[in-house]
Amino acid sequence: MLQESDRTHIEKLLVLTFSAATLGPRSQEFVGQLNALQLKSSVQKELIAVISEINRDMPQYGQPSVDLNRSNSTEVRHQRSLSDLENDNTRLNTIIDSCKATIQLLTNEKEDLLSHLNESNAKLVDLEVAQQEALNYKNSVSQLKDHVRRLDDICYQKEVEQQKSLNEITRCHEIIKQFENSKTDELISHLKDENLNLSTQVQILNERLDAAEHSMSENDGLRLRLKEVNTLRSENKVLREKLETYITTAVALEDEKRINEALKVQIEQLKLNMSDVEVRLTAETVKAEQAVYDLAKARTKLESMEIEKNELIVEQVRLKDEIRRRGSPTLELDLEMSGHSPSTLKPLNADERSELEMESERLRSAMEQLQKEHCEEKEKLERQILELNTELRISKEKIAQLENEASNARMLYESSKASVEDRIHSEQMSVTVVRLERELRDASKSIEEFQKTVADLNNELASKAEELHSSKRTYMEYLEKARIAIIDMEASYSSSPYSTGDCARLEREIKAKDRKIAQLIEQLDTSRVLNEQEQRLLTTSCYKMFSERSCAFSTADSPCSTGVNAHGPVSSSHKWSSAFTSTSMWILIALVSALISAVLYLMFNQQKPSTWKRGFVPT
């Protein structure tokens, strides 16, 4: 589509053509040819109106009314003006060529700036997203710190509970030692075996607790080496899962605490039962020993009486044999004299025998009773031993439960160790956030410097616009001079006494001047394009300056980046620094491009001549 300036130039060309045709010697023929073209009625009316306006404004073609000397002076003046115009045309052509080269450079640089501007906009969006992510990570770091603090409290409570469990194990160990002091051999051997097993288990638990304390000291050392940052989004997911695990662990810890309280109550009851059992066992042992002693004493007495009885029987048999052998009455006499006769001796032996039998029966019944009591005591002791075995089995189960609790505590310690790793990651994230804030402050300072540079470039752009406006005004003055010269030439042509050949030559010269005027108009358009290219060149030079500035910044930041590399990764720092620098540069380039577009729009509006009217040549 044609622009407004192109339409204006076409109208001016048509006006000049119609003026030359209607004011010449063959104006009637030209009008007849226009009528013979069979144009549209609206177009034909418009052409006739233009021709009539030209005939009204321009002087009529006639015979020359001045003398030859005046025509010669006019021709000389025209030749001088033509030579001046040619010189001006040559100078303008030189200027236009230089402007074309400059505008071409500006055009290329502006295209580069536009491409870099698009890249900077994309990087700016990435930077905003990264800043939002940094804020989110900072909030998550604070939440993780609070969570780690709570986990430390939970670990401390778990350690207290472990200490309580150790105390309970110590009490059980003391109870086992009390079992070792009992008098029953089987119970002593059995309890010794159980005591050995329990001591082994307690030693294992102590070793595990020492290992846990050593691991805690290692964790304290690890807290001092928290300096690196890993991928944060995946860590957030892992931390959420761990948080759920910690919640379930806290519930399990509450359950274990209640179980420990119940276990304490049971251990107290067990201690009381054991003291009662020891008292009963001591009393029964005393009774059993007394019964054994009485039984042994009765057996000794019975044996002595049996021996005495046998001796008496032997003595009686011997005496009877002696009496029977001797047949002497002296023995009977002696017996009678002593008050003992064989009749009285027999009953005496019978009484003694009956007494001995009664005593033996009494001792036998006492022995049976003692045996019965001994069996009962033995059964009681067996029941007590069975109860003690049951209680021992219960204590073993409780010890196994304590071992399970210790294993759970170890698992909790491992989870707390994982929480320490999470704390390490949170500290690393906080260090990264601080470093990003420092880089943001540096980038804001560089943006201020770029803004100052943009202000200087705007001033330079305004000065270039003024120069362009002055050159445009000069070109318009040249065009007005050319139009005036053409009008003077046409007037002199109408009043010149030259022949038809001279008029034709002058007409050719006028046409040549018209072509030169058209060329000058095209050169004016070209100069406007060159001005745009010059503005592009300015934008490109601005971009080069910003690139050099960013390179200087990156060179200055390289030692700092090396220092960071000694403690952690550098890629993220360099990435953020380059992103901030390039983003600031592209923001400035966008501002400069917007200003250039506004200036070009104003200049284009100023280039439209407000005094031109359709149908006549402006003077």
Image: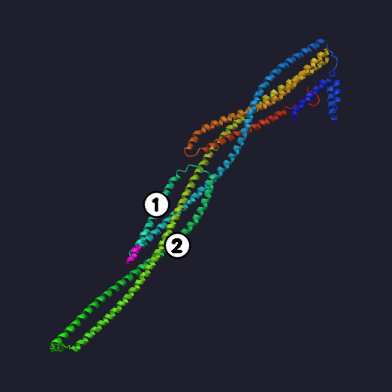
Quarter where residue 291 is shown: bottom left
Q: Nearer the viewer, residue 172 or 472?
A: 172
Residue drawn at the location 66% of the way across and 27% of the way down = 533
Check if residue 356 falls in the magenta segment.
no
For the residues carrying marks 1 and 2, which lies nearer the camera in this image? 1
Q: What residue type is labelled 2?
A: Ala
Location of residue 486 by image quarter: top right
Instruction: Say which residue label 1 marks.
Output: 210
> Which image quarter is the C terminus in?
top right
State whether residue 298 is above or below residue 583.
below
**Mark 1 vs 2: CB contact within 8 A:** no
The magenta segment is 183-191
Coordinates of residue 75 in the picture (x, y in percent): 78, 13
Near-viewer residue (247 or 293):
293
Q: Is mark 2 on a helix, strand or loop?
A: helix
Residue holding disc 2:
262
Q: Is residue 188 magenta?
A: yes
